């Protein structure tokens, strides 16, 4: 059986994305080396990282292909907080079953969602 342990986003705007995700996640990066082009956080049981990648130019071209999900019991409140720090609203919070989902985009246009935990 496989175990997903990390997710990485390639970018040419490492400093901007690092500053953005520090606010989204609510803490400074656990590891950061801007000279080497890397920043990362332990977020729950997975490691989330940003890496300077020379082939990534401009905004993402297919933002919904892969989405990050950040679980929170306070989807509506976190939506307002993250929107206020500059996330682009893709879809306002909406109910799905007994939970909530909201979709936003980071400064490179990558989509991420705030979701009610499923368990």
Image (cartoon, grey):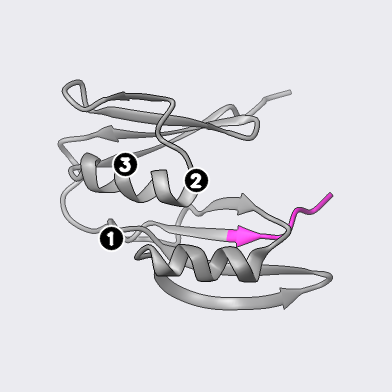
Q: In which quarter of the image is residue 110?
A: bottom left
* Image point (21%, 27%), residue name: 34
Q: Which of marks 2 and 1 is in front?
A: 2
Residue 1 percent coordinates (x, y): 74, 23
**CA separation in Å, label 2 and label 1:** 24 Å
> Is residue 27 rendered magenta in the image?
no
Residue 59 percent coordinates (x, y): 23, 59
Q: Which of marks 3 and 1 is in front?
A: 3
User: In the rendered structure, are the residues bearing label 3 and label 2 in contact, judged by CB atoms less than 8 Å apart?
Assistant: no
* Image point (21%, 35%), residue name: 53
- Between disc 2 and disc 1, whose residue precedes? 2
Residue 12, above or below 1: below
Query: How many labels, in total?
Result: 3
- Between disc 3 and disc 1, whose residue precedes? 3
Q: Which of 53 and 14 is in front in this view?
A: 14
Q: Nearer the viewer, residue 62 or 117?
A: 117
- Local crowd at mark 2 within 10 Å, few (<14), some, or many (≥20)? some
* Image point (22%, 41%), residue name: 15
Residue 57 horizontal side relative to residue 81, left or right = left
Identify the residue under disc 2: 25
Identify the residue under disc 1: 61
Identify the residue under disc 3: 18
The kind of secondary structure element at disc 3 is: helix
């Amino acid at each position: 059986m496989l175990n997903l342990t990390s997710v990485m986003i390639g970018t040419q705007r490492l400093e901007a994305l690092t500053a953005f995700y520090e606010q989204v996640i609510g803490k400074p990066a656990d590891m950061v080396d801007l000279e080497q082009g890397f920043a990362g956080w332990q977020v729950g049981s997975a490691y989330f990282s940003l890496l300077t990648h020379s082939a990534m130019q401009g905004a993402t071209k297919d933002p919904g292909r892969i989405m990050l999900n950040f679980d929170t019991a306070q989807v509506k409140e976190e939506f307002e907080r993250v929107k206020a720090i500059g996330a682009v609203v893709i879809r306002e919070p909406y109910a799905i079953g007994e939970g909530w989902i909201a979709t936003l985009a980071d400064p490179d246009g990558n989509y991420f969602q705030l979701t009610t935990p499923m368990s």
